[in-house]
Image (cartoon, rainbow, N blue to C red):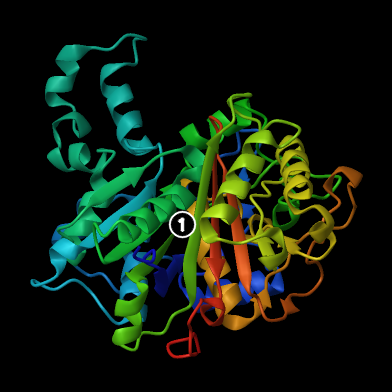
């Protein structure tokens, strides 16, 4: 019986509301420095919430292919930049000889058509209250092939595979807030099954638009603490009242373990386990007892060949909504039992906000960095304990310790639950220390 192929994380890249690269983002997470601020992308003064965690001062510095960028919307540009960071960090990219042995798995957002294009078409063809089909004949966005291309659900995936010359398996995942985590899990299975040897995996999203803000406001999901945007996201705090909408992208390069070692790659962590479930409870809420998340967490541990005693850090989904944080806390207590007082927990949404489809991918990168650097970022803005969220939260200052294994939770609207587990390179069976993260 052949042993299961292991999967190494060898490159990481981030574009987030607190930094346009890995180093800047990591420093902000350790400091608990929030990306929350008044919305600048449009006039949000008419909404109950007019704050968000925007990516700030962004311009593509690593990708200057104008022919490619003209097909890219805002979130696609985040993806291209973060993916390029990851490729350069890994020190490898597809070649003509091995392009078919590379895959691409990405978590993508639900917003396709850009709001400005929709608004222009509405003004031209729909101001009477009904669509004027004749008006579409000379409407700008309706007759622009680039608008059509940018609005395709698979366009981000297409841009990434074209940019890097990936010719193997390619897929995009949209399961709301679970998308990025499930993309990582898909990549893990592709390499394990021998379908490919390397995968560019990640997630990207940007819903900071009148449509995105209005939808979440109607669901009462967003914090309306407009006067204190930097403290609006406070996961597990008794006064939490909704999340801070964010945007960005996170990517990793994943490689079959022995191939990564053979080329002397730096290995941040092993992507060791993946678990998924579906909560048939409510479209917008996790079940109070944490049932679906419990299943996903148990599956991920089992897939990694791990027990609760092996996990040192949980990057919680931790959205800062009353129901989610209570449900996730119940799930963690149920899964970890006596270990719940030992395992460190933080939600980095407390600083970055909720990046929706990109959240699981960005937080997966955070877990790899926690292992590689021996640091656990803080759960910012926590002041008032909630007895229903009695966890070992990392507050006030980051914890510096050896992190053997991490768990990252992502629970999406619609009930999709994703959990991924990562392992320190030195914890991998048969390791001799070579190739461990520096």
Residue density around tag 1, few if under 14, some if 14–19, many if 20 or more, within 10 Å? many
- Residue 300 seen from this side: yes
Q: Residue at x 22, y 70 (%)?
A: 64
Residue 399 picture location, percent across and down: 75, 76
**Please, what secondary structure does the residue beneath circle 1 have?**
strand
Residue 7 picture location, percent across and down: 40, 68
Q: Residue at x 64, y 81 (%)?
A: 374
Q: Residue furthest left?
A: 96
Q: Residue at x 32, y 8 (%)?
A: 130
Query: Which sits in the foreground, 64 or 191?
Result: 191
Q: Quadrant of residue 116?
A: top left
- Relative vertical location of residue 65 with respect to residue 210 in this rendering, above or below: below
- Relative vertical location of residue 295 with respect to residue 251 in this rendering, above or below: above
Q: Which residue is mark 1?
A: 248
- Relative vertical location of residue 113 with respect to residue 165 in this rendering, above or below: above
Q: Is residue 122 left or right of residue 376?
A: left
């Amino acid at each position: 019986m052949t042993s299961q192929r292991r999967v190494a994380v060898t490159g990481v890249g981030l574009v987030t509301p607190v930094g346009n690269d890995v180093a800047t983002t990591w420093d902000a997470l350790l400091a608990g420095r929030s990306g929350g601020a008044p919305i600048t992308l449009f006039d949000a003064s008419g909404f109950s919430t007019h704050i968000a965690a925007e990516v700030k001062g962004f311009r593509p510095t690593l990708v200057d292919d104008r022919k490619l960028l003209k097909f890219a919307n805002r979130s696609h540009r985040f993806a291209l930049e973060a993916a390029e960071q990851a490729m350069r960090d890994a020190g490898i990219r597809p070649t003509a000889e091995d392009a078919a042995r590379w895959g691409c798995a990405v978590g993508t957002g639900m917003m396709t058509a850009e709001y400005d294009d929709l608004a222009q078409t509405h003004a031209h063809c729909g101001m009477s209250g009904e669509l004027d089909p004749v008006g579409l004949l000379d409407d700008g966005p309706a007759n622009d092939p680039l608008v059509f291309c940018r609005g395709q659900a698979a366009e981000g995936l297409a841009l990434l595979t074209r940019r890097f010359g990936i010719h193997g398996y390619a897929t995009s995942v949209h399961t709301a807030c679970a998308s990025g985590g499930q993309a990582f899990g898909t990549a893990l299975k592709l390499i394990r099954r021998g379908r490919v040897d390397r995968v560019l995996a990640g997630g990207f999203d940007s819903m900071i638009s009148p449509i995105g803000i209005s939808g979440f406001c109607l669901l009462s999901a967003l914090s309306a603490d407009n006067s204190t945007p930097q403290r609006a996201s406070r996961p597990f705090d008794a006064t939490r009242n909704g999340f801070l909408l964010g945007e960005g992208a996170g990517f990793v390069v994943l490689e079959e373990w022995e191939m990564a070692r053979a080329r002397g790659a730096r290995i941040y962590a092993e992507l060791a386990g993946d678990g998924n479930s579906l909560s048939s409870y409510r479209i917008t809420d996790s079940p109070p007892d944490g049932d679906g998340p419990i299943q996903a967490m148990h599956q991920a541990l089992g897939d990694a060949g791990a027990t609760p005693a092996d996990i040192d850090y949980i990057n919680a989904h931790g959205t800062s909504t009353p129901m989610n944080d209570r449900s996730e806390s119940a799930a963690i207590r149920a899964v970890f039992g006596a270990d719940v007082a030992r395992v460190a927990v933080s939600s980095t949404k407390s600083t970055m906000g909720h990046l929706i489809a990109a959240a699981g991918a960005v937080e997966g990168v955070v877990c790899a960095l926690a292992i590689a650097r021996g640091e656990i970022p803080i759960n910012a803005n926590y002041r008032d304990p909630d007895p229903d969220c009695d966890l070992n939260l990392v507050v006030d200052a980051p914890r510096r310790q050896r992190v053997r294994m991490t768990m990252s939770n992502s629970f999406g609207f619609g009930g999709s639950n994703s959990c991924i587990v990562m392992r320190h390179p030195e914890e991998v069976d048969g390791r001799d220390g070579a190739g461990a993260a520096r």
